[in-house]
């Protein structure tokens, strides 16, 4: 039986850019970047001669976001539209979606849509929701509770 989520991971093409996005722009606490290769990652990942760099980002709820850049082998860019099978997205609950939309937009972050209020979401009725594109076009959803509007 599953007990809890320890972390969830994303693969990016440039860890330094991703670290800037998640740490500097979104404000998540970040570990130092680590590089690893050898028997352990080869065995765990099933990829011969694998080498990678990774960074963990601490989320306010205690979960971790693991972001990995594969140095060997280099991966293939995917079509990350949310309609494609296997493409994940992350939903972050924020305290002021409009302010984040404006602040991040001013810093060059590309949004799919402005904050949308209304309708039924998975979280319940009336949540504010907007999608943005993170590193490598990863879909990130910002959500705000109607109680905090």
Image: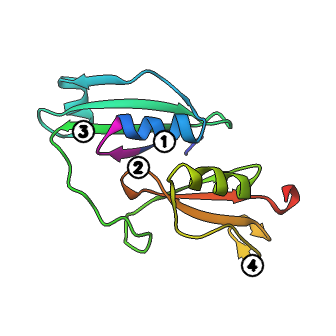
What percent of the width, then of the height, locates residue 129?
A: 67, 65
Q: In the image, 24: left or right of 87? A: right
Q: Which of pointers 2 and 3 indicates the residue nearer the eye?
A: 2
User: In the displayed image of the protein, which residue is found farthest to the bottom?
Assistant: 119
Indicate the position of residue 113 as horizontal and vertical percent values.
58, 70
- Circle nearer the N terminus (2, 1): 1
* Secondary structure at numbered mark 4: loop
Residue range of the region highlighted in magenta in the rendering: 10-15
- Which residue occupies 34% across, 45% down? 11
Q: Position of residue 14 (x, y in %)?
A: 31, 40
Q: CA distance from mark 3 to mark 1?
A: 18 Å
- Sequence-earlier tag: 3 or 1: 1
Side (left or right) of 21 relative to 48:
right
Disc on the earlier residue, 2 or 4: 4
Residue 144 spot, x, y in % from top left: 74, 58
Disc 4 crowd rating (10 Å Cα; few below 14, some 14-19, many 20+) is: few
Q: Which residue is mark 4?
A: 119
Viewer-nearest residue: 57 or 50: 57
Q: Is residue 6 visible?
A: no
Q: Is residue 21 above or below residue 109?
A: above
Residue tagged by mark 2?
135
Contact flag, marks 3 and 1 (Cβ < 8 Å): no
Please check the rendered image and state whether residue 137 is part of the magenta-colored stretch, yes or no: no
Q: Nearer the viewer, mark 3 or mark 1?
A: 1
**Residue labelled with disc 1:** 21
Q: Report the residue marked by disc 3.
A: 70
Q: Secondary structure at mark 1?
A: helix
- The answer for how far apart the CA atoms under marks 2 and 1 are is 7 Å
Q: CA distance from mark 1 to mark 4?
A: 30 Å
The answer to whether the residues at label 2 and label 1 have Cβ atoms under 8 Å apart is: yes
């Amino acid at each position: 039986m599953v007990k809890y989520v320890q972390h969830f991971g994303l693969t990016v093409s440039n860890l330094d850019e991703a670290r800037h996005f998640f740490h500097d722009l979104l404000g998540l606490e970040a570990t130092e970047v680590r590089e690893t290769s050898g028997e352990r990652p080869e065995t765990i990942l099933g990829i011969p001669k694998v080498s990678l760099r990774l960074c963990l980002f601490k989320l306010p709820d205690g979960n971790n976001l693991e972001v990995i850049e594969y140095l060997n082998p280099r991966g293939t860019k995917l079509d990350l539209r949310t309609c494609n099978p296997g493409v994940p997205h992350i939903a972050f609950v924020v305290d002021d979606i409009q302010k984040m939309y404006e602040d991040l937009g001013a810093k060059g972050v590309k949004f799919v849509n402005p904050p949308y209020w209304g309708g039924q979401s998975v979280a319940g009725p009336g949540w504010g929701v907007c999608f943005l594109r993170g590193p490598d076009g990863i879909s990130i959803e910002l959500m705000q509770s109607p109680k905090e509007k």
